Amino acid sequence: MMNKISQAQEKFSYFDLIPLGVCVLQSDYIVLFWNSCLEEWTKIPRNQILGTPITQIFPHFGQPHYTSRLEQVFQGGLPTIFSSQLHKYTIPAPLPHGKNRIQHTTVTSLPGLDDDYYALMSIQDVTDLTFRVQEYRSMRDHALAEAEKRRLAQESAEAANRVKDEFLAILSHELRTPLNPILGWAKILKSGKLDQNRTIQAVNTIERNAKLQVQLIDDLLDVSRILRGKIKLNLSAFDFASVIQASLEAVRLASEAKSIQIELQLNPHTGKVLGDANRLQQVVCNLLTNAVKFTNAGGKVEIFLEQINSQLQLRVRDTGKGITPEFLPHIFEYFRQADASTTRQFGGLGLGLAISRHLVELHGGTIMAESPGEGQGATFIINLPVIFVPEKEIQEAKIDNGFPSLVGVKVLAVDDDADNLEFVSFLLEQTGAQVTSVTSAKAALEAIKINIPDVLVSDIGMPDMDGFQLLRQIKTLPLQEGTSIPAIALTAYATDADRKRILDVGYSHHFVKPITPDEFIEAVANLVLSIVRS
Ligand code: ADP
């Protein structure tokens, strides 16, 4: 045998020079020759395999569909090809990459050194194909994953669109609903047939509904600001209890109408909060409004305020409809309501709590909701950090908030909307200001030429010449040197972009209609004071 093997090495040595696997078997499957290429592919050195049956290493060659064909080769039959077989090698030595390999094995009969035939197996390793198959598979998997991603993205876009559509439907309903009583009562009032009591009732209804609409629009603008990260806080130090008291006013009527008892337990020894009092009042109002809204007539709402270490804790507990465990985790999400009919039944867009959470977090606080379940009431808890403020600063803040009279101050008011103009003029006159009111920018320019006002209060959207053009025109007027007219814009353009444009053109303040009278007068007063001081 050794002799045979060494003869074979000599005879087939040239097969060591080619990049094909070559081996020679004798009819009992004993390996007589194993070239260097095979050594490299299989990591089986020839001294380990020569003289042993190939089936020990590649058992599949012992399977009938191979043996039957090999038998023919050993008898000098036609060449045969074991083609494109995918084999998992069962050899001890690790195969490159440990992968399955594909081989094309051509088996040819070879006249032996004696009278037998040998089988010359030339093995073409096309393992590369394996990688290509794998590449193809991973490409396919990737494509499938991408398609799945696209499907999910589309689904979520569709869901977002559905939410948007539903939202727009709710929105238009919400904006329209308060218009019915406003327009209805306005028409009846115009007929002049209402007695005094009914007139007061009608005006109250109109006012309530108009306020509701203002609230809705404010909510939407807040959401837009939050989404763009544009909320600004006017910081001051204040007693949180005062915020609660102010918020109570907002729900007093609603709670009285439903005979809901509101109980206050405010610990007087709580520290102050540094924050935006108006924004925090908005949050508390939202909690109280919800508590009253979702509690049946005759129920109870309790408000607790206490200090726990360096945190102020507000708890609003109601005996109302409660929150299901399924809905509880979503309660602070945008446009979330326990059920769509809520909107129809109670009004609201499902924005209040999302806005509240954002505002509380902006103040470094937390907000959470608790409820034992449906019909069992709910508790909302806000924690806010308490600050230490020197007494002096608090007093200074109070003095700054004083409300000066405007006696002797000349104000020019411009608005093409007669009702608004009348209201603003009336408000200013209440403070002693001397008001000239005109209904167009052109008339304002004429008025300035005759008598230069201390302050200009102007609408922005006006026909012919708008508030922007008006301010530009004023700058070109041949006024006495050093004369400038401070101006306040009073407009329905409420977005941040509008605000920026308005301030950019030279207005010192931007008030969105409907204005809060106190804030407006204070701004006029401060403007006059700042001119006097400078
Ligand atoms: P809105 O009140 O405008 O619907 P909110 O964001 O303030 O929006 O509230 C979202 C939802 O959370 C409400 O529609 C209601 O389903 C639920 N919710 C809020 N407060 C309470 C409460 N006190 N009791 C029961 N459910 C509440």
Image (cartoon, helix red, strand yellow):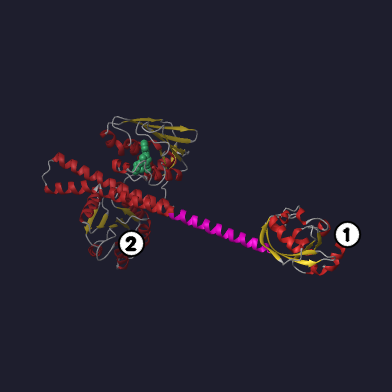
Compared across the picture, whether 521 is left or right of 86 comes to left
Point out which mark residue 2 bears: 1
In the image, 86 versus 473, the foreground residue is 86
Residue found at the very far right of the displayed protein:
3
Q: Residues within 10 Å of mark 2 (few under 14, many from 20)?
A: some
Q: Secondary structure at mark 2?
A: loop
Residue at 14 percent of width and 49 percent of height: 190
Q: Quadrant of the N terminus?
A: bottom right
Compared across the picture, whether 308 is left or right of 127 comes to left
In the image, 211 versus 481, the foreground residue is 211
> In the rendered structure, does residue 31 fall within the stretch colored magenta?
no
Q: Position of residue 149 (x, y in %)?
A: 49, 55
Camera-side mark, 2 or 1:
1
Start and end of the magenta stretch?
126-154
Mark 2 / mark 1, whichever is N-terminal:
1
Q: Residues within 10 Å of mark 1 (few under 14, many from 20)?
A: few
Residue annotated with mark 2:
484
Residue flagged by tag 2: what amino acid is it?
Ser
* Ligand 1 picture quarter: top left
Residue 497's quadrant in the figure?
bottom left
Mark 2 near ligand 1 (CB under 8 Å)? no
